[in-house]
Amino acid sequence: MTIDGLQILLDALRQRGYRVVGPTVRDQAIVYDDIASIAIALDGPTSRMAGIIVLIRRDDEALFG
């Protein structure tokens, strides 16, 4: 599925009254919350345990990595 196709699916679900939840970033942590746009996932954050959990940018194109 393309990025545009995923956004169309997300929009269609929301228009039909579904709540769409996915990983988002809040307070330097990845949390699950309502999402309205796939653009949230395009930054591609991931977390790594290094004594503390820190967010780092991914260098691939994985969504929700």
Image (tube, rainbow, N blue to C red):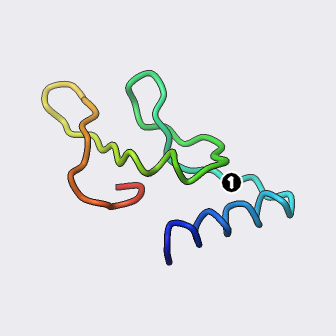
Residue at far left of view: 50
Residue 35 in the image: above or below residue 17: above
Residue at 57%, 67% in the rendered image: 4
Residue at 31%, 60% in the rendered image: 61
Residue at 48%, 27% in the rendered image: 26
Q: If the image is split into quadrants, where does the C terminus sit?
A: bottom left
Residue at 63%, 46% in the rendered image: 35
Quarter assignment of residue 60: bottom left
Percent position (x, y) of residue 31? Answer: 49, 37
Task: Judge by depth and name the residue closer to the eye, 62 or 21.
Answer: 62
Residue at far bottom of view: 1
Percent position (x, y) of residue 1? Answer: 50, 78
Q: How many marks?
A: 1
Residue at far top of view: 27
SS class, disc 1: loop
Q: Is residue 51 left or right of residue 27?
A: left
Q: Is residue 2 left or right of residue 33?
A: left
Percent position (x, y) of residue 57? Answer: 26, 41
Task: Judge by depth and name the residue closer to the eye, 44 or 33.
Answer: 44
Tell me the amino acid under the disc marked 1.
Val
Residue at far front of view: 4
Q: Check disc 1 and report the residue beneath it.
A: 20
Q: Residues within 10 Å of mark 1 (few under 14, many from 20)?
A: some
Percent position (x, y) of residue 9? Answer: 67, 69
Quarter assignment of residue 16: bottom right
